[in-house]
Image (spheres, rainbow, N blue to C red):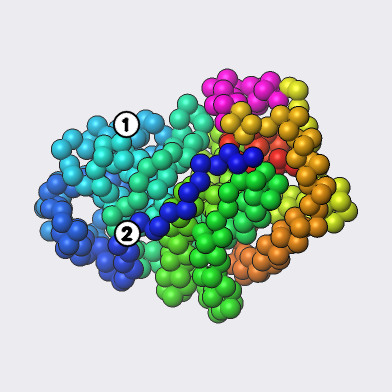
Amino acid sequence: MSIDNFETKKLPNIKIVSKINLTKNAEELISQLGYNLKDCLLVSDKKIWQKYRQNFGKKFFQNIGDLLILSNPIADQYFVNKISEFIKDKQLIISFGSGTINDLCKYSSFLKQINYLVFSSAPSMNGYASANASIIINNHKKTLKAHTPLAIFNDLNILKKSPIKMIKAGIADTICLYSCWFDWKLSNLVFKTNFSDQSLKMQHDLWLKLFKNYHKFDLRDGYFIEILIDILITSSQAMNIANGSYPASQSEHLIAHSLTMKYPKKLKNILHGQLIAITTKTSLELQKIILEKLQKKQLQIPIIEKNWQSLLYKFFGKKIALEAIEEFKQKNLSNLNINKINQEIVTNYNLIYQELAKVYDYNQMAIKLNDHFKISHNIRQLKISKLQYFQAQRLAKYIRNRFSCLDFF
C-alpha cells in the first residue's frame, strides 16, 4: 500500500557560495546570474535588516529596485499575498533571512513564476535549498510545492554572529535525520511506502565527519559554522532528491506542527529548531518502545478511534480539524486494512527489527552531539503542561498524510 507520490530526482543546479564578507559583493553576484539589481526586490525581516543592512554597502541601496522589510512576519497566506502584491514587474526576489523569510519568498516567487535567491542570515534551519515551503493555510501548517533558489549565498561573518539559540536550532533541525530515517524506514517496511537511501546517506556521510571532531568545536567556531550550513543545505537537497520532505520531516515535525497549530501564541517566540529538539526526543522514546515491542513480537497498529474526528474538532477547532481530516483520509487507513497489515507485521517481525535497530543505533551519536552543545529538550520552555503536550502528540498522526511511529500509539 504505497500512498506516497514518489519519484527519485536529480539535484537541481543551485549555485552555493560560502565566504567571509560575501554580502558586500551582492550586486556583482546577482549580475553574474544575469540580473540587474534594479529589477530585483529584496525581502527581509525588520530585526535582521536593522542588524545587517550595512553589510550590503551604499552602492547596493542606490541600485536595488525595491525593498520590502516585514515586521514580525509569519509564514502564512497574509504575508505571501503581501509579497506577491509588492513584486509588480520585478524579475528576481532576494531573500535575506532564514526560515520564515525563506518560505515566504520561495512560495511567493513560485506563484508569480519568477526566480529567487537567498542570502542566509543564520544556520538555523534546513529549508534553504528545498523545493517546498511550509505555509499556514486556514490555520493549518502545510508543506506546499514551490521551487528551489537560483543561488544560496552564505556570508560566514553574518552566520557566525547569529544568536546562539539559532545555531542550536539549526543543529536540532538537521540532527533529527535519524528520527526521520527510522520513521521513513518503518513506513517503508510496514506500509510499503517508497524509500530513498540516497537522500538519507548523503546527510549521514556529512554527520559522520562531524561526529569525529564535534568535541573540538564550540558554537562560534567558524569552521563548525561552515560545516553546519553545508549540512543544512545538504538536508534540503535531500528533500529534492526524495521529491518531498520525507528525509527531514517525520514524527518529530508532526508533533511540532500539532503544537504550533494549537498553541501559536505560546510558541511564537520558540524557534522551529528549538521545538524540533524537544519533539525529536519524544520520537526517539516512541521509537525505542517500537523496537522493544518488536523484540517481544508484540508490535501492532491500534485500531482507529471511533471518535477521532470529534477529538480533532474539540482540540483544534473547526478550521484546522477539517484540514486535518482531509489529510488523514488520504492515508487510506481503515480497521480492515489495519488488521491485514498487523498480520504482515507478525510474519516479518525479525526483518523489521533488524532494519530499524541499525538506524536507531545512530541516535547515540546524535545524543552525544546534543549534549556537547547543550541543546535543551525541556518541555517547560514551551510554557505548556505535560498533558497539553501529550494531547498534541497523541493527535499528531491525524494532521498529515504521512506514516510514522505515531501510527503505532
Place of residue 255 in the rendered image (x, y in percent of width and height, measured from the top left): 63, 42
Q: Nearer the viewer, residue 378 or 80?
A: 80
Estimate the spatial distance between the alpha carbons at disc 2 and disc 1, rounded to whole Å: 28 Å
Residue 246 seen:
yes
Amino acid type of the residue that numbered disc 1 sits on in the rendered structure: Asn
In the image, farthest residue toward the right: 296
- The residue carrying mark 1 is 81
Q: Secondary structure at mark 1?
A: helix
Q: Quadrant of the N terminus?
A: top right
Range of residues picked out in magenta: 308-327
Magenta run includes residue 319: yes
Where 207 falls versus 2 (above or below)? below
Q: Which residue is under mark 2?
A: 13
- Residue 94: x and y in percent read 26, 50
**Horizontal and vertical percent for residue 297?**
86, 51
Q: Main secondary structure of the magenta part?
A: helix
400 or 76, nearer to the observer: 400
**Mark 1 Cα shell of 10 Å, populated few (<14), some (14-19), many (≥20):** few
**SS for dot 2:** loop
